[in-house]
Amino acid sequence: MTEENQLRVLVVDDSAVIRELIAVNLELEGFLVVAASDGEAALRAVREFEPNVITLDVMMPRLDGIETARRLRSDPETEHVPIVMVTGRSSPADLERGRDVGVEAYLMKPFEPSELVEVIRRLAVNGRAG
């Protein structure tokens, strides 16, 4: 598959270990991956990389995942990109905050790599649910 045809995922997490784990699992499945260490870096990277899906951690320095998702949703150029929260934050309030900003899926850490790949593939192919 050529780079032009590959599905692209922007992986955003302040943990280098988690970024690498997600990236390796997606790359093994044929995805093209770019990583960012926080929300501010993600907002810069999204313009150039034009991902099909974004994974976001909730707890990050400088700009957290919820605020990053809110900004992505409020921008006409990125409002259509599906977002998967990959986080250890799983309280009902956390899930509601994610839904309120338009997150399509939530995966709890520690996650099953095969489930991550399945969710991202489905969203990359089907796009946002509306």
Image: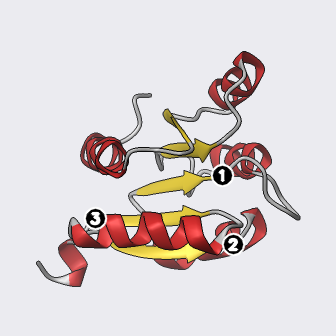
Tell me if residue 72 comes above or below residue 45 in the rendering: above
* Crowd rating for badge 3 (residues with CA inside 10 Å; few <14, some 14–19, many 20+): some
- In the rendered image, the residue lying farthest to the front is 110
What is the x, y in percent for residue 124? 31, 50
Q: Residue at x 66, y 41 (%)?
A: 88
- Other-residue count near label 2 (Cα within 10 Å), few / some / many at <14 / 14–19 / ≥20: some
| Quarter of image, res 26 | bottom left
111 and 126: which one is in front? 111
Mark 1 vs mark 2, CA separation in Å = 10 Å
- The x and y percentages for residue 89 are 71, 36
Q: Are marks 1 and 3 in contact (CB under 8 Å)?
A: no
Q: Quadrant of the N terminus?
A: bottom left
Q: Secondary structure at mark 1?
A: loop
Q: Comparing marks 1 and 3, which lies closer to the viewer?
A: 1
Residue that label 1 marks: 57
Q: Is residue 46 visible?
A: no
Query: What percent of the width, then of the height, locates residue 127?
Result: 35, 42
* Among the two numbered marks 1 and 3 on one chain, the one whose residue lies closer to the N terminus: 3
Residue located beneath label 3 in the image: 7
The quarter of the image holding the C terminus is top left
Question: Furthest-bottom residue in view?
Answer: 2
Q: Is residue 24 visible?
A: yes
Frontmost residue, 4 versus 91:
91
Discs 2/3, front: 2
Tell which of 130 and 69 is nearer to you. Answer: 69
Mark 1 and mark 2 lie on one chain; the one further toward the N terminus is 2
Q: Which mark is residue 37?
A: 2
Q: Is residue 6 left or right of residue 91?
A: left
Q: CA distance from mark 2 to mark 3?
A: 21 Å
Query: Which percent across, then down, holds residue 110?
Result: 53, 45
